[in-house]
Amino acid sequence: MADSQAALFGPDPVILPQGGPLYLQLKRWIEDAVARGAIKPGDALPSERDLASKVDVSRVTVRKAVQYLVQDGVLVQRHGSGTFVAPQPNRVEQSLGQLTSFAEDMARRGLPLRSVLLDRGLYSPSPEETMALGLSPGDRVARISRLRISGDSPLAIERASLSASVLPDPAQVVDSLYAELDRTGNRPVRAIQRIRAANLNEADAKLLEISAGAAALHIERVGYLGSGRVVEFTRSVYRGDTYDFVAELRVGEGAHK
């Protein structure tokens, strides 16, 4: 018996975590086995029939639990081979208290970074871009969309929009957008950032190499110059299994008075 199957098929009876439908209880049990290292990345999951017999649930329940785990990126299915524990990418932390670029975040951590250019050019602005950037009729917008990769793991998709008056030649951006804006004196000094949980659509999931519907972080950033002018409107999609945003919280002044 393989090590992963021995870990799940030990002599003790399986006790599923209580609460919710059976398939969710089984899902949490397998997630816990992965989290504690009982089954490791690359290990094969027991067959659907064997797992159903061991846990004393139907094969339909097993199939549904596995489908959700594949969708969440915990498991991967290989046609003709079976179901395996997915590789677990290293997590990256970003502080919410600092205005930095993705390239700067990765460099500070000593992590390798490369980008795949998805789009770069000058366009007529969308209504959303017009409002966010405060553009006038006839203005053009510079767009730069990139897939951000560290090692072999795609981490994020960044779609930045700026007024063409700020970035007249998007081709000047090679690695870091902020480096180019810094060079021209147009780097934002503050920003408002909104983060929301969402499920990946099929196109973005394919770029990030995870299942459609998997959890992701959608981040919208509006960056401002010191004068108060909006200079950047960026919408990004981060893999939920690789990125953590960290904020330091302090008690407000006068809270103890």
Image (cartoon, rainbow, N blue to C red):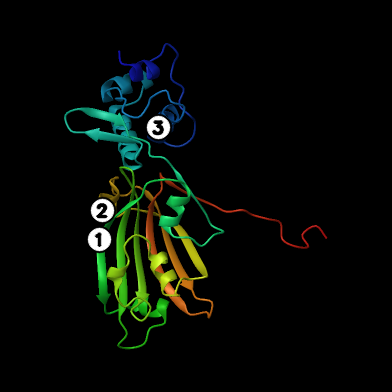
- Mark 2 vs mark 3, foreground winner is 2
Circle 2 sits in a helix, a strand or a loop, which is it?
helix
Q: Mark 2 highlights which residue?
A: 202
Give yes or no for contact between labels 2 and 3 (Cβ–Cβ under 8 Å). Answer: no
Q: Amino acid at mark 1?
A: Leu
Q: Mark 2 or mark 3, which has the lower sequence index?
A: 3
Q: Mark 1 highlights which residue?
A: 118
Counting from the top left corner in percent of width and height, residue 247 is at 57, 54
Task: Residue 209: tell me if it is visible.
Answer: yes
Residue at mark 1 to residue at mark 2: CA–CA distance: 16 Å
Q: Amino acid at mark 2?
A: Glu
- Mark 1 vs mark 2, foreground winner is 1
Q: Mark 3 or mark 1, which has the lower sequence index?
A: 3
Most extreme residue toward the front, as rendered? 183
Most extreme residue toward the right, as rendered? 257
Q: Which residue is rendered at x = 25% and y = 50% of the image?
A: 206
Q: Mark 3 highlights which residue?
A: 22
- Up/down of 195 relative to 154, above or below: below
Q: Nearer the viewer, residue 2 or 120?
A: 120
Circle 1 sits in a helix, a strand or a loop, which is it?
strand
Horizontal relation, residue 25 to residue 205: left or right = right
Q: How packed is label 1: few (under 14 Cα within 10 Å), some, or many (20 or more)? A: few
Q: Amino acid at mark 3?
A: Leu
Counting from the top left corner in percent of width and height, residue 38 is at 42, 23
Q: Nearer the viewer, residue 18 or 88?
A: 88
Q: Mark 1 or mark 2, which has the lower sequence index?
A: 1
Q: Nearer the viewer, residue 102 or 54?
A: 102
Circle 3 sits in a helix, a strand or a loop, which is it?
helix
